[in-house]
Image (spheres, grey):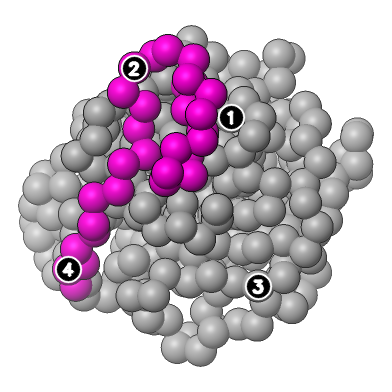
Amino acid sequence: MPGKASAYYHDHVPPGFDISITRFRIAATSNSMDKRIHRDGVKRGFPINQSRLADVPCGVASPISRMPKVVGGENALPREFPWLVSITRKGGHYCGGSIINSKFILTAAHCLCSGTDSIPARQFRVTLGEYNLREPEIPAAIIENVRRVIVHPEHTCGQYVNDIAILELESPITWSASVQPACFPTVQGEPGYKLYENEPAIAAGWGWLGEDRSKYKRTDVLQKVAVNVVNNEICKEWYKVEGKKTRVEPQQMCAGYESGGRDACWADSGGPLMVKNFLKKEGTIVVGIVSSGVGCARPRLPGIYTRISAYMPWIIRETN
């Protein structure tokens, strides 16, 4: 991740297309501890601005690793993002992902593509509780096989709109201080929904430390970088000023700075864009998926992320 932490998986951005999202109620209507399982499959009894899809508390780091204020890219703390996983292929880190519940991982659909072709599920592994890719974790990181991949039906390999996919694991996850599920946002149009525009956010991953791969390398230690969520119209205008014909669709979001310098970069794809849960002191919500952009950390070319709230109905259907 430049600026110390920057990165995606690909360097080109294709044209997008529109998709209509059917409204699907997933948000609690109060802060009361209602423990019922509603018709939509979402557990209630948590803050109104988040969705929990697991049977244990979500979005909370280990007590020894609360999220500090981040000024620039730097090493993350061990267990700081226990929902963040490393998706590996051919024995090495390939993309990031976020734990949905004990069976499913959320990632970017383009991570499951090779050019315009899909990659079989058997080629992927998911490492849970990872921090340093080259040093053994204590407790040991857990490697899970992937049973199947579930790609959004309107995603096409080689493109980045609807860039969202789910991995189903062969074995259920055992929770620990190093392995916890993420919290996700409420769906558009429902109580507690937010765009998070102009709010601070954090991206994290094991991607490259700079765009020029002849000068920089991929990190072994999990990195985090502070970015700002940018209004979509401003983001589109910045890209236009820079001579890019990039489209930013409503189901996407931008994060970065006009001056550049901080971003996600190669091999950070699929990882989370996170904001603080304003109703939960120590909580974090995963609101975006590292998806695309032009280069890494360039001025007026912020990273483009999949907006998770636009896909919550689909995520719920596929994981319940």
Q: Which residue is mark 1?
A: 58
Q: Earlier in the sequence, mark 4 or mark 1?
A: 4
**Label 3 crowding class (10 Å Cα cut-off): few <14, some 14-19, many 20+?**
some
Mark 2 residue type: Ser
x%, y% of residue 295? Answer: 37, 61
Left or right of 303 on screen, residue 105? right
> Can you tell which quarter of the image residue 116 is in?
bottom left
Left or right of 251 on screen, residue 134? right
Mark 1 residue type: Cys
Mark 3 residue type: Arg
Q: Earlier in the sequence, mark 2 or mark 3?
A: 2
Q: Residue at x 91, y 41 (%)?
A: 140
Q: CA distance from mark 1 to mark 2?
A: 18 Å
> Residues in magenta?
17-46
Q: Are marks 1 and 2 in contact (CB under 8 Å)?
A: no
Please give the label number shown on residue 18: 4
Q: Which residue is mark 2?
A: 30
Discs 1/2, front: 2
Q: Who is closer to the viewer here, 113 or 151?
A: 151
Q: CA distance from mark 4 to mark 1?
A: 31 Å
